[in-house]
Amino acid sequence: MSIFAERMKTLGTETAFEVLAKAKALEKQGKDIVHLEIGEPDFDTPKNIKEAAVKALYAGYTHYVPAAGIPELREAIAEYISKTRKIDVDPEEVVVAPGAKPIMLYAILACVNPGEEVVYQNPGYPIFESLINFVRAKPVPIPLKEENDFRMDHEYVKEKITKKTKMIIINSPENPTGGILTREDLKLIADCVADRDDVVILSDEIYSRIIYEGEHESIASLPGMKEKTILLDGFSKTYAMTGWRLGYGVMRKDIAQKATQLMINSNSCTCAFVQMAGVEALKGPQDEVDRMVAEFKRRREVIIPGLNEIEGISCKKPRGAFYAFPNITKLGMSSREFSDYLLNEAGVAVLPGTSFGEYGEGYLRLSFATSVENIKKALNRIDEAVKKLRKP
């Protein structure tokens, strides 16, 4: 008899960390690796944010604080979301967590029962499917297809949102495709649940500030949808604060109370001085964010044309986030086979599309959160690796 609970068999993982470990092991053996596997900005956290954390440390922010977050940060988040999503947000509708992932977990634990259906994008962030399975709910994937610019097929969505649907998870800009849901897409979902009081939308908007054309659209801003939406956002991507572990959810007060209960039972609270750094991030200068996004856009203009010049590979231009999702179906290898080949033979660490769900087969995910020099080096190595495949 195993000591482990049955539910542990249902938990998935993030392949990015597994590939990173393999890449690091190869580096220890002396191999030069170009890292395109990890979705992490390669910029340092802005100086004003770090200084705010240090100041908070010396000011005594080293003890327990309210489980839902310190008032200063909840107020700053409420003000920020009210302004950017054009909705009225009360600080009591904000729950701060050590990263955005806990909000995913709390939302699903609080709202979804075993056997209930959860609709989500596929390919998509793998933790969503992992958590759906963990709570014994039924995953209902919505394929994101390249021919539809990695948006949802409207007729398919209408078919899959049924009376059994309890939660709909959306992510825009999307990981791994870089696709963006339009206002038309969001309105479709809103119309499907307009008369449903028992359905919750979990809207992952962690890449909301990393958009290259147009403006971010939130489903929470549509009429009647704020009350149905748990909006997830955080500081990791926008402010290069991945290691700080600071995220938040904006939701109805009754859901916020349940999420706070789960915080108390798991983390007690989020690190106090880190929260003060979050206040500075939102209220301080945004110049560094603008510079970072401009640099990501510059890198996009290098990696996408470069991939399209490699015979057998094609890639759509992502409109948001910092990922390329090239099509490799013409190479005659599975996503995992080709990603392993690139790592071991070419020294380029990428992720197979299947790390993000079954509909990711035939694709790779490449993070361009690295220097132009590294991107060019990776492109040259991928090109050479593909040419070797084609030699008789």
Image (cartoon, rainbow, N blue to C red):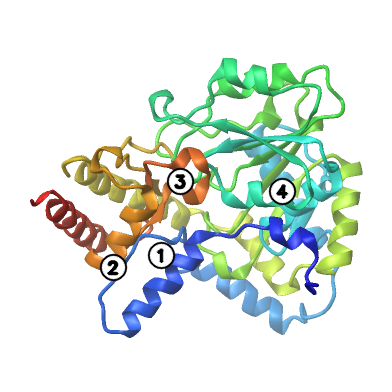
| Residue, disc 4 | 133
* Residue type marked 1: Asp
Q: Is residue 290 left or right of residue 166?
A: left
Say what secondary structure mark 3 lies in: loop
Amino acid type shown at disc 4: Asn
Amino acid bearing label 2: Asn
> Which residue carries the number 2 mark?
344
Q: Nearer the viewer, mark 2 or mark 1?
A: 2
| Distance in Å between CA atoms under marks 2 and 1 | 24 Å
Q: Considering the image in quadrants, where does the N terminus appear?
A: bottom right
Residue 203 drawn at (x, y percent): 66, 39
- Which numbered disc flags the more N-terminal residue, 3 or 1? 1
Work out how far the residue at label 4 is from the one at label 2, CA to CA, in angstroms: 32 Å
Q: Are marks 3 and 2 in contact (CB under 8 Å)?
A: no
- Tell me the quarter of the picture where residue 266 sits: bottom right
Residue holding disc 1: 42
Local crowd at mark 2 within 10 Å, few (<14), some, or many (≥20)? Answer: some
Q: Amino acid at mark 3?
A: Ala
How many other residues sit within 10 Å of disc 3, few (<14), some (14-19) or many (≥20)?
many
Residue identifier under label 3: 321
Q: Nearer the viewer, residue 217 or 171?
A: 171
Q: Secondary structure at mark 2?
A: helix
Sequence-wise, which precedes: disc 2 or disc 1?
Answer: 1
